């Protein structure tokens, strides 16, 4: 069983996550989920990245919610079993940042 | 240059498209786009299908807008160059129906 992070732990984890990257790569809270927009050169690059992330997600059994149109991918992370954002989401966010 | 379909042509094309499949596979108009929800057994099946469609879309240079969460994929088709739904969208919808 995995627990959702408390508000305080969530803020701290988000600050730590974003401190490692430039502001155009920052995650934010949106609709109660961990959200980031990813932009790529073109569809092929975007989908290649999605494929790599999909394989990682499947191995972890922790999947993103994501919307793709051409070179853009909007990602929403939450942990349904926990009823909120958990450490698993931050782990996936880190992996996604690295690409 | 490709043109958006007229309302009449759009209705006719939608009727034709849906006449070939069961009602749970029907497309509809949503937010001015051609919309269908696809459900799969699991994430792996959903993303495998997306990958196949992505390759087809890239070859045609006509890409979907799609949202995936676990075994669900919501697809929105439109032709930006035409400012509306065109025959290209119906061609992609046919391909997606076949899987």
Image (cartoon, coloured by chain):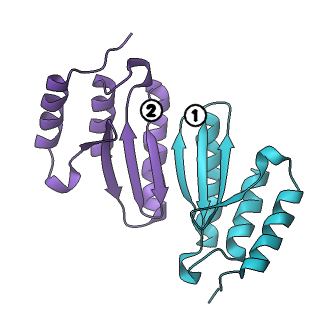
Chain colours: A cyan, B purple
Q: Which mark is residue A20?
A: none
User: Where's residue B53, x and y in %?
Assistant: 43, 41
Q: In this rendering, is residue B7 above or below A45?
A: above
Q: Where does label 2 land, which residue?
A: B57
Is there any visible trace of residue A54 in the rendered image? Answer: no
- Say which residue appears at 62% left-offset and 43% top-offset: A48
Q: Where does label 1 land, which residue?
A: A43
Q: Secondary structure at mark 1?
A: helix
- Say which residue appears at 65% left-offset and 52% top-offset: A52
Q: CA distance from mark 1 to mark 2?
A: 9 Å
User: Where's residue A85, x and y in %?
Assistant: 65, 74
**Chain ID, mark 2:** B
- Which part of the image, by quadrant, shows the N terminus of chain B? top left
Q: Residue furthest bottom?
A: A1
Q: Secondary structure at mark 2?
A: helix
Q: Are marks 1 and 2 in contact (CB under 8 Å)?
A: yes
Classify residue B55 as left or right of residue A97: left
Q: Relative to the observer, which residue lies in front, B6 or A45?
A: B6
- Say which residue appears at 65% left-offset and 82% top-offset: A4
Within 10 Å of the Cα at label 2, are there few (<14), some (14-19), or many (20+) other Cα atoms?
some
Within 10 Å of the Cα at label 1, are there few (<14), some (14-19), or many (20+) other Cα atoms?
many
**Chain ID, mark 1:** A
Labels 1, 2: one chain = no
Is there any visible trace of residue B6 in the rendered image? Answer: yes
């Amino acid at each position: 069983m995995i627990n959702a992070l408390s508000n305080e732990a969530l803020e701290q984890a988000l600050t730590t996550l974003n401190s490692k990257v430039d502001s155009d790569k920052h995650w934010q809270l949106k609709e109660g989920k961990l959200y980031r927009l990813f932009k790529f050169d073109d569809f092929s690059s975007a989908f290649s990245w999605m494929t790599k992330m999909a394989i990682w997600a499947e191995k972890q059994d922790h999947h993103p919610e994501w919307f793709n149109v051409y070179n853009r991918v909007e990602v929403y992370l939450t942990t349904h079993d926990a009823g909120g954002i958990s450490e698993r989401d931050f782990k996936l966010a880190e992996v996604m940042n690295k690409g």
